Amino acid sequence: MKQQVLIYSRFPKAQMVRIGEHYDLLDGAGKLPIETFSAGQLKAIRVMITAGGQVIPPEVLDTLPSLGAIICYGTGYDGVDFAETKKRGIVVGNSPAANAASVADLAMTLMLATTRRLLPADDYVRSGGWSGAKPSPSMRPGPGMTGRKIGIYGMGEIGRKIAARCAAFETEVAYFSRSKHDVPYAYHASLAALAEWSDILMVAVRAGADTEHAVDAGILKKLGPQGTIVNISRGSVIDQKALVAALENNVIAGAGLDVYEKEPHAPDALTKFSNVVLTPHIGGHTIESHVAMQDCVLANLHAFFSGKPLRYPVT
């Protein structure tokens, strides 16, 4: 008989197929567990799979008295209250670095699409502006990549892969993180100093209370009117109201965003800017990344149900 596992977040069914081959999945399709399953069913649940950014309130944990492990599908775990898990003796696992390459690829895509004005250029062709030889301010030449200063906020697995990709574009790369790393890039002592140095600021830091709204109006002002910001981290790291104001007032040149303060992100002030490129949190959404994340989830599940430490614990 298969062990039962609760699916807490809303996942596409295709992402759970491999896991379902090994375990009996109780999938609430994103609803609160108690709304979908009986108290008796939940009482026996020992493991939950969740999307790392989705908040798990204490009231939800109260309905799962036997819960021993929370397994995050992906690298993030900012939705987990570690004070609560520690108090309840619940271990937490994730999928470290499983999607790092894919996220770094999208960071580069957003950077190039924004700085090279890909969306206005696409519209210029589709609208007939090019064939009609109509003047377009958006088609004025802008700076290329060679020699540009790329600042990376966060030098974890994703940050390192972004840095390596940026270096291949003949740019200067520097970074700021909580500590120095053994990497061939200049370290700045503060985010403010990095932003002031940078032409392009890449946000690749892990989300948490210490990084919430770290990129505020002051940081954006230091980035400057020729500066571009790219965020593939979490929406909470950027003060979104400050970002909108900076774009409206030409404080910065543009932005490439895969994440937002509220997701899914509905059309609003951000979506009206032609110098902003938006994607629907798809940084890690490649076949290779999903296979790697599923491998980590399965390894953690197998270890837990075998009475062993998690293969990929969050410590």
Image (cartoon, grey):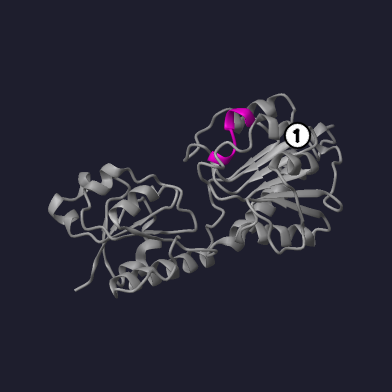
Q: State yes or no: residue 197 in magenta.
A: no
Q: Which residue is mark 1?
A: 222
Q: Tell me which residue sits at (54%, 57%) in the image.
A: 284
Camera-nearest residue between 134 and 306: 306
Q: Residues within 10 Å of mark 1 (few under 14, many from 20)?
A: some
Camera-nearest residue between 74 and 63: 63
Residue 8 percent coordinates (x, y): 32, 52
For this view, does 99 lie left or right of residue 130? Answer: left
Q: State yes or no: residue 241 in magenta.
A: yes
Mark 1 secondary-structure assignment: helix
For this view, does 105 lie left or right of residue 130? Answer: left
Figure quadrant of residue 244: top right
Give above or below for 20 relative to 141: below
For this view, does 104 lie left or right of residue 208? Answer: right
Q: Tell me which residue sits at (32%, 70%) in the image.
A: 304
Residue 269 percent coordinates (x, y): 59, 27
Camera-nearest residue between 127 and 194: 194
Q: Main secondary structure of the magenta part?
A: helix
Quadrant of the image for the N terminus? bottom left
The stretch of residues the image draws in magenta is: 236-243
| Residue 121 in sight here | no
Quadrant of the image for the C terminus? bottom left
Q: Tell me which residue sits at (58%, 36%) in the image.
A: 213
Residue 228 percent coordinates (x, y): 73, 40
Q: Tell me which residue sits at (46%, 65%) in the image.
A: 293
| Residue 103 in sight here | yes
Residue 194 percent coordinates (x, y): 74, 44
